[in-house]
Amino acid sequence: MKRVYVNEEWCLGCHLCEYNCAFANSGLKYMYDLKGARIFPRIHVEGDDKITFAVSCRHCTDPICVKSCIAGAISEKDGVVRIDRNKCVGCLTCVLVCPYGALAPGEDGIMQKCELCVSNKDGYPACVSGCPNKAIVFEERGADI
Amino acid sequence: MKKYVIIGNGAAAVGCIEGIRSVDPDGEITVLSKENHHVYSRPLISYYLEGKTDTERMKYRADDFYDKMNCAVKYGVSASCISPDEKTVTADGKENFGYDALCCCTGSRPFVPPFEGLDTVTKKFTFMTLDDALELEKTLKKDDRVLIVGAGLIGLKCAEGIYGRVGQITVCDLADRVLSSILDCDCAAVVQKKLEEKGLRFLLSDSAVKFDKNVAYMKSGAEVNFDALILALGVRANTELIKQAGGEVNRGIIIDTKMQTSLPGVYAAGDCAEGYDQSIGANRVLAIMPNAYMQGFTAGVNMAGGDAVFDNAVPMNSIGFFGFHIMTAGAYGGEMSEEKGDGTLKRFYTKDGYLTGFILLGQTERAGIYTSLIRERIPLDTLDFESLKKFAAYSIFSPEIRRKKLGGVV
């Protein structure tokens, strides 16, 4: 299945993916409504003065967050790992187990994660379509186990 | 067609069902559930009392879960005996269920010592099941003085849960600190202070020895008046069925890394079982929910003829009180180093060049990166551990590890 990958040699560290992610999942009509707002993106750029890259959910083939969620709020369907925010109580067990550090609470303290934009208005990962240097790609790599 | 019987209906049972179905779509699965509830998350009962969830949302799996998994659940049914030679489970002393593979997911029960005068206390509770929470919800009144015996995970989560419903909460424990099973003295002191700021009262290195109606007489000589008493002194694994059937039992049912007990065709998973703990290199009961699911899943795969092992379990806890988050994992031996921040404290334990455990107070972002260092035994000399201690990040890994972990299907 297709997943989001970041080619770190092309990443500019511009953080645009964070804005595109926050906007795609915000339900807001215009990007400028995010001006001045604290954003809670599901992808995070990290790095230092030498290298930068973005990290988001890997949609693991054997997702430990799904197995660990004490509320049964995280599930996997067709390879996409999703969270039912209505069930999540914010215990952060998923944060404790995700080896990629890919889950973080949203503004309300309830967890959120990358769901490959499958259910927002974009329907295609906004971090990918908005990456100015095409460092973030949505593609098939290797076989799913 | 293979016949599977699962005793119990908690997280381990769900893991077991999903594990079986990942291998065998057709076999006949029967679940014996003592509780009359659709599978729900027990650790959520404190969130229920706090008003953060409800009985609908507490369901660990959707309403159609058993249908979709094509399994039969017998509610209100208790297994009374396992006959390993006949390969049957007897329920409530009458009905027999035959099995090819059996999984014991019987969980644990609250440990209540025989306190003198406990029978004179009218409002007393344990805190483990949904029914316990519903009973507390019904009984507690806003001016009640509550005494909680036990300052462990259950006692303190209960305190947080009932906080908005009662007048005063006192917590006592024989241990010299709160959360003594997961925190050292310094870290426990930080947490205790946070809780005291919310108005909780603690009596530590002290416990009740005797009760008389609404008074607890403490070891120290102190007397505590209360309207409701909550007993949270820990839990005991439900091992009796396996023991009576001749299976090997210690504090929990002894299982190997395939979750098999010493009885052929009989598996065990969850709080009732004593499985391999990587952090100490020996078996012990790891009564935590993720572990229950993963043990259950592993058991299910093997019951259905697959080949699964679960050999990298470590103790880990993510627990929060009034918005202050605590995460712990692994074992605390070896060398300790710490990072202090504004209202945060992180302690890391290393041994022979590996991270073996940690305690994080107040700063828990991306903690799973730390956990993965323990579980995957990643040598610390392959990464920038000094930076990692400050912030959990992927940039501290070598480009090769990063490429492997972030660049392909994992």
Image (cartoon, rainbow, N blue to C red):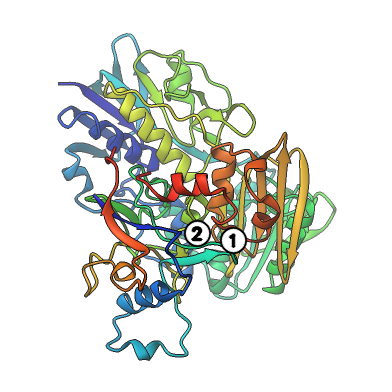
Q: In the rendered structure, the residue with mark 2 lies on which chain?
A: A
Q: Which residue is mark 1?
A: B364
Give above or below for A70 relative to A23.
above
Q: Quadrant of residue B2?
A: top left
x and y percent of residue A132 in the render? 35, 73
* Residue at 38 percent of width and 34 percent of height: B296
Q: Which residue is mark 2?
A: A92
- Depth check, front residue: B28 or A75: A75
Residue B92 in sight from this viewpoint: no
x and y percent of residue B26 in the render? 15, 29
- Depth check, front residue: B360 or B368: B368
**Amino acid beneath label 1:** Thr
Determine crowd level at label 1: few under 14, some 14-19, many 20+ residues with C-alpha closer than 10 A.
many
Q: In the rendered structure, the residue with mark 1 lies on which chain?
A: B
Q: Secondary structure at mark 1?
A: loop
Q: Quadrant of residue B67?
A: top left
Determine crowd level at label 2: few under 14, some 14-19, many 20+ residues with C-alpha closer than 10 A.
many
Give above or below for B178 relative to B308.
below
**Amino acid beneath label 2:** Leu
CB within 8 Å, label 2 to label 1: yes
Q: Is residue B2 left or right of residue B410?
A: left
Q: Secondary structure at mark 2?
A: loop
x and y percent of residue A43 in the render? 42, 66
